[in-house]
Amino acid sequence: IFVALAAEEQGAVGSNTFVQRAFLQGLDIIAAFNYDAVGGRQGIPQSVRLFAPNLQQSPSGEIARYYEYVGGLYLPMFPVRVINALDREGRFGDQKEFVNAGLPGIRIIESEEDPSLVNSKKDRWELVDYNYLQQVTQLNVAVTATLAGGLTTPEIPLIEVADTPGAYRLRWPVDPQAAGYALSFRPINQAEYPLFHFVRARDAGDVVLTGLDSTTTYAVSMTALDENGRPGPFTPEVIIEGK
C-alpha cells in the first residue's frame, strides 16, 4: 500500500501511529520503503542511496539486499548504493518506527543532498529533476511489483552439513507453482548477495550443494522463482557456523 505519513519532523508521529494501528489490525507488512527526498537536482549522480541498519544480520539488511538486486535487474544504469546505517548521521526518517517495531525498514534518498535546501523555503518545484524522479519511480515500481507479485516465501529449509567438507544438504517443501529456486549462501561479513545457486523445480526439495568453504560462516536463504524467473521474498536467513 502507498501511505503518506504526517508529522515526521515532529518526531515521526504519523509513522508511529500507523505502525501501532497496523499491529492492532493484524496487517502482514513485508517491508517499509521510505522514499524521502528523491526529487534530485540537475548534475547529481544518477543513482540513489539506500540506508539499512545492521546490514549483515537484520531483517532490514535482508530487504535491502533484495531491493538492490531487483533494482539492478530492471534499472542497471540507475544503481542503488546501500549504506549500513539507519539513516544519515544525526537524521531520521519514518522507516525508524518500522525498524523499532521489528519490521524491515529502509530509506531511499537521492544520491547527493544540498544542505542549504533541507527543510528550507528554497526547496522549490522548479529545482526537481523530473528525469531523475522518473527513474526513482521506475525503481520503486520494479521492486515493489516484483516483491508483491512473486510467489510466496518458501518454508525455511532444513540445512545439514554433509560429510564432504564444503557440502550442505537442504530440504524443503516444493511449491507446485514454482519454476525453480535461487539459493543464497552469503558469507556473513559480505553485505550483498553472492552468486545464487539455481535449482529447477523438478530437482528441488532435497539438494546437496558442494564446493563451498567449510570454514566460512554463511547466512543462508532462498526464494521461489515463478515461470518468468521473478523472485519473490527470500526466507529469513539461517546462520551456518564455519568450522
Image: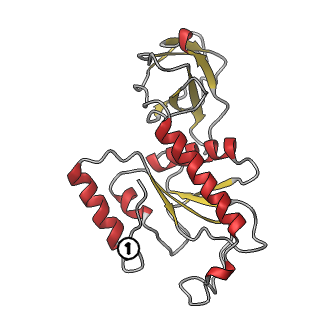
Residue 128, quarter of the rendered image: bottom right
Q: Quadrant of the C terminus?
A: top right
Residue located 64% across and 22% down the image? 212
Residue located 50% across and 34% down the image? 150
Position of residue 50 in the picture relative to residue 24 (left or right): right
Residue 193 shows up from this direction = yes
Q: Position of residue 152 (x, y in %)?
A: 43, 31
Instruction: Identify the secondary structure beneath mark 1.
Output: loop
Figure check: 194 above or below 13: above
Position of residue 180 in the picture relative to residue 160 (left or right): right
Residue 105, quarter of the rendered image: bottom left
Q: Position of residue 15 (x, y in %)?
A: 35, 66
Q: Position of residue 2 (x, y in %)?
A: 43, 58
Residue closest to the eye, 40 or 64: 40
Q: Position of residue 178 (x, y in %)?
A: 50, 20
Amino acid found under the numbered disc labelled 1: Ala
Figure check: 196 above or below 170: below
Position of residue 42 in the picture relative to residue 228 (left or right): right
Residue located 65% across and 34% down the image? 194
Figure check: 236 above or below 1: above
Residue furthest to the right: 43
Residue closest to the eye, 79 or 187: 79
Residue closest to the eye, 94 or 57: 94
User: Can you identify the residue that label 1 sits on?
Assistant: 6
